[in-house]
Each structure stands twice: as structure tokens, then as C-alpha cells.
Image (cartoon, helix red, strand yellow):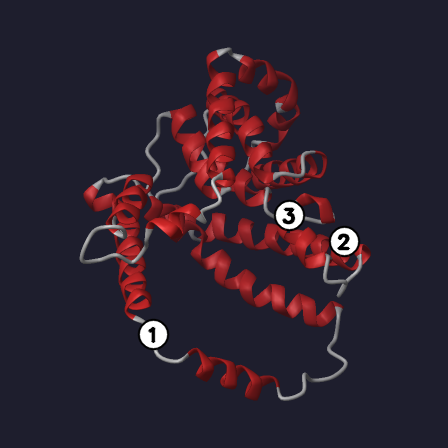
Amino acid sequence: GSLLARGLTEQASGVKIYWAKWFLAFLPADILLLVLSWLALLWLFPAQSQLADGSDLLRKKLQELGAWSNAEKKAGIILGLLLALWMTDALHHVAPEVVCIGVCLACFLPGIAALTGDDLKKLNMAPVLFTGAALSLGAVMSKTKANEVLARYMFAWLEPWLHSKLLTVVGLYWSCFLYHGFMPNAQSLLSTTLPPLLNFAAKNGMNAVPVSMIWTAASGPSIFLFQSGVIVLAYSYGQFRAKDFLKYGLLMAAIEFVVLAAVLLLVWPFIGLSLRN
């Protein structure tokens, strides 16, 4: 979702978004949410007993894996290089997607050979094609001016909420959360709503990048099983009920809102992210 949102935002606004800035903007929130999500789970569903031999079983499985193979070592070095190039894109100005393509091609070079042709055949191309289609849909909406019509009717009610930073976060976050209930796939949600939203934001003198970041973050929390294939997969194991996930999802949506609002007010100004141009 974040990669799609970045591409849509750059297309709609013409503003360059650096991977490093996006990373720094959400790093404090991600660290907090990792801790708070676990605490929320323990509070809602207290553990009744400990897993038998849990830590010993994990150590045994780790030992069975053995030492890293040469291919695994190469993959680790390549991934480290990839992350280093991503985090320094503000210095070398090479787009993250270009870095990805270059690193992937390097994996097949003689002397490196971290991947083979057989590995490439196993790649699931559906997510790649779906993301490309979503980006194309956003471009079509922009060219046909459909985003202007949608902005006029979808986001006009947000104008009274734009008078302060906190109210802006409230309006944007919970609006996207509501839309997510009717449009469960996050990529479809972003591709159809971000272009008109950014058009609306521009007309109201708002900065496209933080608006896009807030909207993207709000597309993440889920309360219904059908909102993500990952959730459906987890549900298929029969370890929780739909109402269990609903309770946890609502609690985490509220927690994420508080964390996002705090980060926006306390951290984002120091990395050059302001809601107003």
C-alpha cells in the first residue's frame, strides 16, 4: 500500500517523495505500534497457559537449519545493499523502484547467482500486475478529470475539519477508515481515492505528502475478515472468531489513530513535513 501510495502521490502532485523521509516519518509510530499491538492482544485475550517446550522447540528448529549457505549469504548482502540504497535516496536521487530492478537483475549475474531462472519461474506476477493496473487507474482518473468530480462530492464535507492539525488528522483518518469498510482491498481503495483527495488537498492549500501519508496509514487497520487475504488465511486455521478480530481491530484502529496524531504533531515538523504549504 505505501509503495502504491507513493507512486500515486508523485503522479498526482509532481512532488518527489524520498524513501528515507517516509521511513523516518513512520519509524516512531511503527515501533510504538509493535509494542502496543502485543499489549492489546494480551489485554483482550489473556494467555491461559504456556506452550509446552516453546523456547526449547524454537532453539531445536534453529539448530536444524544449520549454517548459512553461500546463496543465503549473498542474499543477505544484497538485501543489505538494497536497504542502504533506499535509505540514502535523498543523496543519490535514484528512485527506489530503479534500485529494486537493478538489485534484482544483479542477483542473476554470473559470479553472484543468488537467484536462478527456476526461481524466477516461481514468482507470482499477480501482485505486480495488480499494482500496475491500480496505478493506471489513478492516471486515467487524472486525465479524464474524474478525480475533480469525486473530490467535489466525496471530500467537500472535510473542509470544516481543516482548521487545525489535530482536526485534519481526525477527519482524514476516520474518513479513510470508513471507506475501507466499503472498499476492503487497500490497493483498490488507494488507487481510487488518493487522486481525488490530493486534488482536494491542493485546492485547500494543503501539502500532498503528509495528506497522502495519513490516508495511507488509515487504510491499514482492518475490522472485518474480508478486508485482507492475509486475515482470511489466518482465520482459516480456526484459532479466533470474527467477533474476536472485530474487537481487536477496533481497539488497534483507535490506538493507531492516537499514535499517528502524536507523531504528526511531535515528530513530522522536525523532518520537514507540514500539512500546510
Q: Identify the residue shown where x is 68% and y is 58%.
A: 234
Q: Which residue is mark 1?
A: 68
Alpha carbon separation for disc pair 3 and 2: 16 Å
Q: Identify the residue shown where x is 24% and y is 49%.
A: 106
Q: How many marks?
A: 3
Is 106 located above or below residue 137 in the figure?
below
Alpha carbon separation for disc pair 1 and 3: 32 Å
Residue 253 image offset from top left, x and y in percent:
66, 51
Is 85 located above or below residue 175 in the figure?
below
Residue 194 image offset from top left, x and y in percent:
53, 29
Instruction: Name the amino acid type tagged 3.
Output: Gly
Q: Nearer the viewer, mark 2 or mark 1?
A: 1
Instruction: Name the amino acid type tagged 1.
Output: Trp
Which mark is first along the chain, 3 or 1?
Answer: 1
Instruction: Name the amino acid type tagged 2.
Output: Leu
Residue 93 image offset from top left, x and y in percent:
23, 40
Q: Crowding at label 1, few (<14), some or many (≥20) Cα neighbours within 10 Å?
A: few
Location of the C terminus (image quadrant): top left
Residue 257 image offset from top left, x and y in percent:
61, 50
Nearer-the-camera pick, 79 or 164: 79
Q: Which residue is mark 3?
A: 229
Q: Residue 246 got which mark?
A: 2
* SS at circle 2: helix
Nearer-the-camera pick, 71 or 235: 71
Q: Identify the residue shown where x is 57% and y is 26%.
A: 192
Alpha carbon separation for disc pair 2 and 1: 41 Å
Q: Residue furthest top?
A: 144
